[in-house]
Image: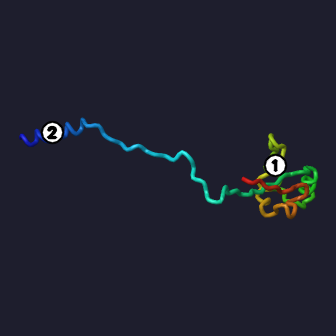
C-alpha cells in the first residue's frame, strides 16, 4: 500500500509542474527567388467594333457562341466574352479572332 501512495504523490507532483512549450518561429518575409520576379503573360480578347462584330455574326462568318456572355467592364469599358478570351492565346496579336475583335496581353 505504501508504494501506491508514493506513486499517487509523484503523479500529483508531476501534474502540478508547469509544461514548457517551445515557441514557434515564423519567417517574417517570403524568401526571394533567384533571378528576380517571374511574370506570366495572359491573353484576352476585346470587342473594339461592336457593329462589325455583330454584322459578322449575323452574316454567319463568325460563330454565334462568341456573342453569349458578352459583358462590358464597368471600370475600363472593354467588351469581352469568355468564348473570345479562350481563343485569344492562340490568336495573340498575329491574326484577328473575328471582325471587330482584337487580342491583347497583360503581364501578371
Q: Quick check: 56 above or below 76?
A: below
Left or right: where does residue 1 sit relative to residue 108?
left
Direction left: furthest residue = 1
Q: Nearer the viewer, residue 87 or 8?
A: 8
Q: Against 82, is 1 above or below?
A: above
- Left or right relative to 28: residue 35: right
Mark 2 vs mark 1: in front? 2
- Where residue 102 appears, x then y in whole percent? 86, 56
The correct choice, above or below, for 102 with respect to 17 in the image is below
Q: Residue at x 70, y 56 (%)?
A: 39
Q: Position of residue 42 (x, y in %)?
A: 74, 56
Measured in 3D between alpha carbons, the distance from the residue under mark 2 to the one under mark 1, in whole angstroms, is: 77 Å
User: Which quadrant of the view contains residue 2?
Assistant: top left
Mark 2 element type: helix
Please say if the residues under marks 2 and 1 sit with CB atoms less than 8 Å apart.
Answer: no
Checking the image for residue 91, the label placed there is none
Residue corresponding to mark 1: 70
Q: Please rate how many residues cluster around mark 1, counting C-alpha atoms within 10 Å: few if below 14, some from 14 to 19, many from 20.
A: some
List x then y, in percent, for residue 97.
85, 60
Taking the view exactly as shown, the residue that stands out farthest to the top is 16
Element class at badge 1:
loop
Residue at 20% across / 37% down in the picture? 13
Residue ranking furthest to the front: 35
Q: Residue at x 77, y 57 (%)?
A: 43
Residue of label 2:
8
Color scheme of the displayed model: rainbow
Quadrant including the N terminus: top left
Q: How many marks?
A: 2
Give the percent coordinates (x, y) of residue 59: 93, 58
What crowding class fits label 2: few (fewer than 14 Cα within 10 Å), some (14-19), or many (20 or more)?
Answer: few
Q: Nearer the viewer, residue 49 or 22?
A: 22
Amino acid at each position: 500500500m505504501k508504494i501506491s501512495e508514493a506513486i499517487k504523490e509523484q503523479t500529483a507532483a508531476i501534474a502540478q509542474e508547469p509544461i514548457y512549450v517551445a515557441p514557434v518561429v515564423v519567417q517574417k518575409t517570403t524568401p526571394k527567388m533567384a533571378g528576380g520576379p517571374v511574370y506570366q503573360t495572359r491573353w484576352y480578347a476585346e470587342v473594339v467594333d461592336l457593329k462589325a462584330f455583330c454584322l459578322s455574326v449575323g452574316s454567319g462568318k463568325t460563330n454565334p457562341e462568341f456573342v453569349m456572355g458578352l459583358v462590358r467592364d464597368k471600370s475600363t469599358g472593354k467588351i469581352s466574352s469568355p468564348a473570345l478570351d479562350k481563343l485569344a492565346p492562340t490568336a495573340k496579336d498575329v491574326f484577328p479572332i473575328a471582325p471587330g475583335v482584337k487580342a491583347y496581353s497583360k503581364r501578371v
